[in-house]
Image (cartoon, rainbow, N blue to C red):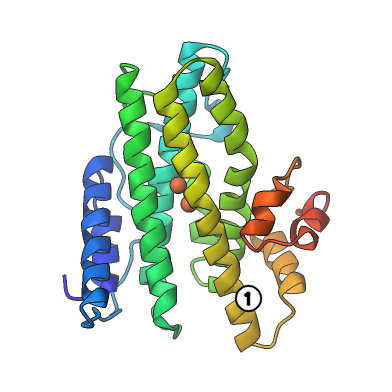
Amino acid sequence: MTSLAEMAVDVLTTADGREKTAKSRAHAAAWFAARAAGTPLPVGQATPPLRPARPEAPALLDPREVPKRKPGSPQGRIALLHAVAHIELNAVDLHWDILARFTHVPFPPGFYDDWVKAADEESKHFNLMCDCLEAEGSFYGALPAHAGMWRAAEDTAEDLMGRLAVVPMVLEARGLDVTPGMIEHFRKAGNSGAVAALETIYAEEVGHVAYGSKWFHFLCGRHDLDPRDVFHKLVRTYFHGNLKPPFNDEKRAEAGLPLDFYWPLVESADA
Ligand SMILES: [Fe+2]
Ligand SMILES: [Fe+2]
């Protein structure tokens, strides 16, 4: 691989989850090794697929057809781990997609470092969830999964600010709201492996939301736009549904998401 964009497309066009994350981690290591050596790889150009390659299993279903999870039962907790694994695999592709799709927009090197680091961490998260599933006698692909997750990427394929608003600043921020409750379910069930894995995910996701906020504000500054107003406009354009409290205000603040960004969208996201 000679450029970051080519590495991104290599990940996006790999279907198997473990193979995708292995490539993702190897490419991230190559990117950071070249940066550390003072010989950074070029960003380059490549054409990412509209939809990333995915394994044959899990079957992707309409969200209404995915069975409801009851985390009080062992089967429900397996379903929860499976759902998180699916989210993490999507996140790997989402971060590589932003690196490949918007190469025409100039950025300082920190932009690429941030999203390569995020992609590397999502790859670790997917592997952690697969390990937890396998420890419970299951695996990624054993259950159906949510089909709608790539929609945010397709909707914002031509709008980088929309992508930043919806993916890290809405969807990944939502992860900060719900992960502590998930950790509690596994703690009550005495599954210390899943607790440790989810705590790693929870800690690192704050950084991904922060990268979103940082580069969103960077672009607002470049184009002389009011960040809060533009955020509201973009979320109303590209995000289908309302934002749902309760919010994790503390972690959102840590990630650079002020209260007045998300509270006004609780009732009016599809207005
Ligand atoms: Fe993650
Ligand atoms: Fe993330």
Q: Where residue 200 sits in the image (x, y, percent)?
A: 44, 42
Q: Residue at image x 33%, y 32%?
A: 130
Viewer-proximal residue among 127 and 242: 127
> At label 1, which amino acid type do we have?
His
Q: Residue at image x 49%, y 67%?
A: 157
- Which quadrant would the N terminus be assigned to in this image? bottom left
Q: Residue furthest left?
A: 1
Q: Where residue 64 sits in the image (x, y, percent)?
A: 59, 30
Q: Is residue 186 at least partly visible in the picture?
A: yes
Secondary structure under tag 1 reads helix
- Which quadrant would the C terminus be assigned to in this image? bottom right
Up/down of 213 relative to 120, above or below: below
Viewer-proximal residue among 145 and 27: 27
Q: Where residue 109 sits in the image (x, y, percent)?
A: 39, 80
Q: Residue at image x 37%, y 57%?
A: 119
Instruction: Please give the residue where the numbered disc 1 appears in the rendered image.
Output: 217
Q: Is residue 51 at least partly visible in the picture?
A: no
Q: Where residue 51 sits in the image (x, y, percent)?
A: 38, 55
Count how many numbered circles sit on residues in the image.
1
Q: Is residue 225 left or right of residue 143?
A: right
- The quadrant holding residue 194 is top left
Q: Is residue 232 left or right of residue 201?
A: right
Crowd tier of the residue under label 1, counting other residues whose Cα lies within 10 Å: few below 14, some 14–19, many 20 or above: many
Q: Residue at image x 41%, y 58%?
A: 118
Viewer-proximal residue among 52 and 25: 25
CB at disc 1 and ligand 2 closer than 8 Å? no
